[in-house]
C-alpha cells in the first residue's frame, strides 16, 4: 500500500533543517512499491524529487511535485570468490550502518568512509569520498528504476562515469533514475589507507601500532576525526562540504602560490592541482562568520550552517557571498557540491 500524503513539511527530511514543503510525499520501503507508484496515472507527469537522508540537499523553495523518500532496506551477501565478497544493500540502508556491518564482518574497503550521513542509494550519486577513498573503488553495480518507463536498469562501474564528487546521475541521468540497490565488491584481505589527513596521528593517539592495524581501528580513527571537526546535523543544520574543492591548472597554482606561499595544493595526477576550498574561504575572512541565522562553520570553513530558523535563501545568500569573496581574491570560482533545489 502506498501512503501518498499532501502538503508535507520537509524539515525532518533534510539535515540543513530547512522548512520547505512538498505538495505530495510518499515513502518507498520496497522496490515493488516503485512499480505500483509508476502505475498511478495521476502522478505520471508530476515532477519528482528523490530523497534519501536529505544530507546533501538545500531546499530554496517549496517543491510543487511528488517527493519520494527511498527507504528500501536489506543487506545481502550476493556471492564471493577467493579475494572478494559482493554485498548488496537496499538504497534506503543508512550508509554508516552499512559500513559498520561490513567492518563487523571483516569486509574491507569502506572503513575510511565511516560516519558519512545519508543512504547507500545516494552514495554513488556523488561518488562519496573521504580520507583517501571513494566509493567507486569498491563499486560493482547498481539497480535503478527509470522514472519514465518504470523499467529496471543495471548500471555498471563504466555506466556510472564516476569522477571527483561526480557521476552520470548528476548529468545526463539526473532525475531520470531512482537507485533501488547498490552492490559493492569488498576485499577479504584488507588494504589499509592511513596516509590521508590525520589518520596516522589519530591512530597513534589511540595507542594503535602498525602491527595492530585493522579495518575496525581505521573506522574508529575516522569517526574520531570527523566528530572533532564536522558539525553534527542533529545539533546544527548543515550538509557537509557546501562546495567542491576546486581543481586548477598547475600553472595557475604556481602563479597563486607565488602570491600566497602557504597555499596548500594536492596534485591530481591529471596536470591539475586540487586546492582546499576551506583554506580559500578562511583566507577571505569568512570562517565563523554569521549573517542572521546562516553562516560559515567556525571549525570547518567549507561547511555552511543553519543556526536555526534560516531559510534556503539565507544559506544561498551566504554561499553567494563566499563565492564572490573567493573569486575576487583568488580568481577561482567555487562550485557547489550540495544539490540546490
Ligand atoms: P540526499 O541528500 O537525500 O540526496 C542527494 C542527491 O541524491 C539528491 O540529488 C537526490 O535527488 C539524489 N538521490 C538520493 N537518493 C537517491 C536514490 N535512491 N536514487 C536516485 N537519486 C537519489 N559526502 C561525502 O562525499 N563525503 C563526506 O565526507 C561527507 N561528509 C558529510 C558530513 C556531514 C556532516 C553531512 C551533513 C554531509 C556529508 N556528506 C559527505 C554529504 C552527504 O552525506 C552525501 O552526499 C550522502 O551520500 C547523501 O546521501 P543522502 O541519502 O542524504 O542523499
Ligand atoms: N582548511 C583550512 N581551513 C578550514 C578547512 C580546511 O585551511 O576551515 C584546509 C587545511 O589546509 C586542511 C585542508 O583544507 O588541511 C583539508 O581540510 P579537510 O581535511 O577538513 O578536508 P576538506 O578538503 O575540507 C574534503 C571533503 C570532505 C571529506 C574530507 C576528508 C570535499 C568537497 N570535501 O574536505 O567531504 O570528509 O575531505 O576526506 O571534497 C563532503 O563532501 O560533504 C565532505 C565533508
Image (spheres, helix red, strand yellow):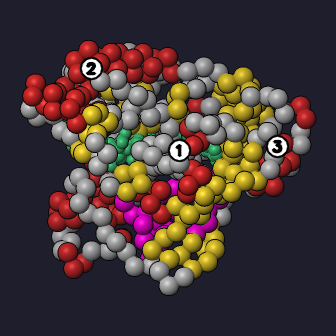
Percent x, y of residue 321: 35, 15
Percent x, y of residue 226: 32, 50
Q: Does the magenta stretch include residue 280?
A: no
Which residue is found at the position 66% from the left and 50% from the top? 179
Percent x, y of residue 94: 55, 55
Label located before the other in sequence (2 or 1): 1
What's the distance in space between the residues labelled 2 and 1, CA to CA? 26 Å
Horizontally, residue 67 falls left or right of residue 280, namely: right
**Residue at numbered disc 2:** 331
Q: Can you name the residue that lies furthest to the bottom here? A: 82
Query: On screen, 224 above or below 49?
Result: below
**Residue at numbered disc 3:** 149
The quarter of the image that holds ligand 2 is top left
Label located before the other in sequence (1 or 3): 3
Region rendered in magenta? 87-112
Residue 262, by quadrant, is top left
Q: Are marks 1 and 3 in contact (CB under 8 Å)?
A: no
Which quarter of the rendered picture does the C terminus lie within? top right
Amino acid at each position: 500500500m502506498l501512503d501518498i500524503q499532501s502538503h508535507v513539511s520537509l524539515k525532518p527530511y533534510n539535515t540543513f533543517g530547512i522548512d520547505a514543503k512538498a505538495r505530495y510525499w510518499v515513502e518507498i520501503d520496497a522496490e515493488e512499491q516503485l512499480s505500483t507508484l509508476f502505475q498511478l496515472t495521476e502522478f505520471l507527469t508530476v515532477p519528482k524529487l528523490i530523497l534519501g537522508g536529505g544530507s546533501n540537499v538545500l531546499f530554496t523553495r517549496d517543491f510543487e511535485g511528488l517527493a519520494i523518500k527511498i527507504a528500501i532496506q536489506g543487506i545481502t551477501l550476493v556471492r564471493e570468490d577467493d579475494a572478494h565478497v559482493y554485498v548488496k544493500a537496499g538504497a534506503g540502508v543508512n550508509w554508516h550502518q552499512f559500513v559498520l556491518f561490513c567492518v563487523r564482518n571483516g569486509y574491507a574497503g569502506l572503513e575510511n568512509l565511516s560516519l558519512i550521513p545519508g543512504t547507500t542509494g545516494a552514495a554513488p550519486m556523488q561518488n562519496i569520498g573521504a580520507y583517501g577513498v571513494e566509493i567507486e573503488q569498491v563499486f560493482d553495480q547498481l539497480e535503478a528504476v527509470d522514472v519514465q518507463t518504470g523499467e529496471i536498469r543495471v548500471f555498471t562501474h563504466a555506466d556510472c562515469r564516476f569522477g571527483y564528487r561526480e557521476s552520470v546521475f548528476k548529468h545526463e541521468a539526473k532525475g531520470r533514475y531512482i537507485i533501488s540497490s547498490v552492490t559493492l565488491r569488498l576485499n577479504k584481505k584488507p588494504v589499509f589507507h592511513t596516509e590521508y589527513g590525520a589518520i596516522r596521528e589519530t591512530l597513534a593517539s589511540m595507542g594503535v601500532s602498525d602491527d595492530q592495524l585493522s579495518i575496525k581501528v581505521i573506522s574508529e580513527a575516522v569517526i574520531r576525526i570527523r566528530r572533532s571537526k564536522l558539525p553534527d546535523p542533529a545539533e546544527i543544520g548543515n550538509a557537509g562540504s557546501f562546495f567542491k574543492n576546486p581543481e586548477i591548472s598547475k600553472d595557475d597554482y604556481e602563479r597563486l602560490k607565488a602570491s600566497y606561499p602557504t597555499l596548500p595544493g594536492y596534485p591530481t595526477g591529471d596536470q591539475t592541482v586540487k586546492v582546499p576550498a576551506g583554506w580559500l574561504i578562511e583566507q577571505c575572512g569568512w570562517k565563523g562568520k554569521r549573517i542572521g541565522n546562516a553562516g560559515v562553520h567556525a571549525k570547518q570553513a567549507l561547511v555552511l550552517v543553519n543556526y536555526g530558523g534560516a531559510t534556503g535563501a539565507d544559506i544561498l545568500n551566504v554561499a553567494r557571498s563566499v563565492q564572490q569573496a573567493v573569486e575576487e581574491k583568488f580568481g577561482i570560482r567555487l562550485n557547489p557540491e550540495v544539490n540546490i533545489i
